Amino acid sequence: MGARPIIQVENLSHTYMKGTPLEHVALKGANLYVEEGECIAIIGHTGSGKSTLIQHFNGLMRPESGKVIIDGVDLSKKKVDVKTLRQKVGLVFQNPEDQIFEKIIGDDIAYGPFKLGLPLKEVRERVKWAMSVVGLDFEQMKDRQTFALSGGQKRKVALAGILALKPKILVLDEPTAGLDPKSRNELLEKIKRLNREEKLTVIFVSHNMEEVAMLADRIYVMAGGKDVLCGTPKEIFTDKEKLQLHHIGTPETVQVLYRLTDLGYKVSVDAFSISEATEEIIKVLHGTKEDLEDVQRV
Amino acid sequence: MSSEFEISRSITIGQYVPTDSYIHRLDPRVKLLLFVVIVVAIAFNTSYIGNAIGLFLSLYLFWASKIPISYGLSGVKPAIPFIIILALLQLLFQGQLFSGGKVYVDYGFILITSESIRLVVVSAVRFIEIIFLSSVLTLSTSTTQLTHSIQSLLSPLKKINFPVHEISLITTISIRFVPTFAIEMEKMMKAQASRGADFGTGGWWRIIQRTKETFPIIIPLFNIALSRAEDLILAMESRCYTPGGNRSSYSVYKTLAKDYLVLLVGLLFAYLLIFYPFPF
Amino acid sequence: MEPIIRLENVSFSYKINEKTKVSVLKNISFSIIPGEYVAIIGHNGSGKSTLSKHLNGILTPDNGDVWVHGNNTKDTNNKRSIRQTVGTVFQHPDNQIVATIVEEDVAFGLENIEVPREEMKKRVDEALNVVKMSQFRHRPPHHLSGGQKQRVAIAGVLAMHPDCIVFDEATSMLDSFGRKEVLQVMRKMNNMGMTIITVTHHMSEAAEADRIIVIEDGQIVMDAPPREIFKHKQELKNLQLEVPSVSQMAEGIHQQFPDFSTELIQEDEFIDEVMKFSKVEVI
């Protein structure tokens, strides 16, 4: 590995409700490394420890045992400047629209920057910037009432509320859950842009394999509180045995290509987008045609 | 190191813990009746010894229901500051009302006597006993059992058109949602902390600031509660629930001989707490 | 066949305040035949959820009528029999569970319609069996996964022996595994003869149905079998809806090989077509 990782998690464990009858182990010995500028997807089933893991990134949870180092700050140390940490690591929870509490969009987005103690002018600039990043028109939308927004718009407002902190690292828990296809695609585009153009390090939890394949540079697969698999989408989705072992789904295209390989077609399975997969099948169809023509000639 | 946000951990009310102890297997109606009677008895008893016995009893029940005492203690923990503040206020300002016994301090309006100390200590202990008892009750009784017991205990009131069923259902649904809301609140605190909110900074005397700090939590929670309630009503109506309608019952409870025995012992105990002249 | 649900010129609007009303459903009419598997799709805000709440009388139309087995939902005397005929499974797994024990929750509806206890036991057993949740019957539901909770909710509806179940975005909060679990149960119940209506914005789910009704701006814009619907790729795109991946892939292949069918909506069909196609080319 080249650069120093911006997030480094080593052998992290956590038990909820320790010492109660409802005690359960959420993490046991998880590891994760993220380099600056990467886009990382974390996948795994409900209860695999994903949410607990990401709550360590901005110090909402402190390592019970093991190590968490965020941009050089060791969170297992007693004294950690959590405030700066939470500014540096923007954490967007699942259904973040629930957390909107101000009546007016602009006010709600400004909550974070005000809490940082920034001057009014700077706050305004940040709100403006954050709104433009998520695709909300500042002049038109800043004074709108929050309750009258659609689900997709509310989610944009909530995301802007985090972006206004100007984080270096953006962590999202199921960012597109419950959105309709249009809002989902819009949001994914925004996240992609933040990663590629604004150079934010992005880590997101998802169970939608299409979006994982589309966005992520690398994927971590969590199971039973541990990282069981890690690699590029290509490495993960082409490792059929491991996919089955850990019950990981694949993008629909990959699923089709796998079935075709099982039937003896020579397609490569690392085509994640519809157009790539189509190309792949067309190639094979051309191929079989030629093969068969050869056979006929003989 | 535990997290500063682990709220759901400290809520012991509403979390049914099936350990299958004999307390769990008791007729829930007997349990509920005894709970009410013993709480009343404790409220009547002002002696040190009586409340020590009450405390002992509630700890015993925790043990007997096979639920770790530490779990019960974690339910008391968040209440401790309130108990202390309340006790201090009582000690300082209510001395005049309960004067009697030996006078320790008499300074301006502050009057501390052995009687007022007794009042303060006993009411603090009482509070803890009641938290313990209600924890044992809810930890060992499922909400459905509770609904049925409240309903059958209140059923005589039906004759005077008291909405017995509605009351019992409302009670149990509120209990059923306590842990859900604890989780919701925890999530909300974390979400707002992630965008820079801080809770509990600044001394407790800065009431206005601290109240303002809770808005980002309270307002969304209120919205969530409303939408959950709306969903729940729809779901219940879709399953043919009609307020005031007659219902049959899935679980039936037979009061067995041992239930009567426990009831008898419990009532006797309550009787003693109320009427026995404890010397101290 | 006599329709199980019939909507006649149904209009509905939400009152925001005394003056403003938002019209959500505009003059909708359709019928559902017993045993059908119907998907109602539309993007958020299209009115599909409001529509689904009309199917068992939770909402009643401002204008027009909804008939369930010939009973008008506006008549409050019919309320109970209508809700027994048409059950609903809602979106949020947590918000439709009333009891703290799985089997007691399944029994909640039965208690409401005063089913005798012996019968109740039988029906709870049956329902839990169909959704494969029998081994969880004594568990508290809040420790189950989303998919399992939804299956409990389905069992609660199933136990009431309805003729039709409406799934109001019942899979939208679930992960892919949970979704698969629920879809399997839906398919199974339809095979048992139950009428299924699913409200969704997942195209792959809609493809499972026998018939799709597309709602936009409170009106029906398409009503046809999936194969028919997914031919209109451009219209669907304009309605902010997506065509299943295999249909999109088939379309792409079709452009190169004009004989390759574009009417494919399910993975199996697609695979078959690829196989058939490579054979056809030989001869």
Image (cartoon, coloured by chain):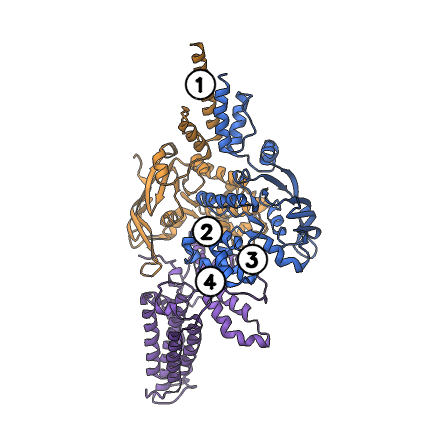
In space, the residues marked 1 and 3 are separated at their CA atoms by: 58 Å
User: Which chain does the purple colour mark?
Assistant: B
Q: Circle 4 is placed at which residue position? A: B176
Left or right, A164 with respect to C49, comes to left
Q: Mark 2 points at which residue?
A: C129
Marks 3 and 2 share the same chain: no
Image quadrant holding the C terminus of chain A, namely top left
| Chain A drawn colour | orange
Label 3 is found on which chain of the structure?
Answer: B
Mark 4 crowdedness (10 Å alpha carbons): few <14, some 14-19, many ≥20 = many
Report if the CB atoms under discs 1 and 3 are less than 8 Å apart: no
Q: What residue type is labelled 1?
A: Gly
Cα gap from disc 2 to disc 1, whole angstroms: 49 Å
Mark 3 or mark 2, whichever is nearer to me = 2
Estimate how packed mark 1 is, as few (under 14), some (14 to 19) or many (20 or more) residues with alpha carbons within 10 Å.
some
Q: Mark 1 lies on which chain?
A: A
Residue at label 1? Answer: A287
Task: Give x and y (percent) for residue C223.
Answer: 64, 38
Q: Chain C is drawn in which colour?
A: blue
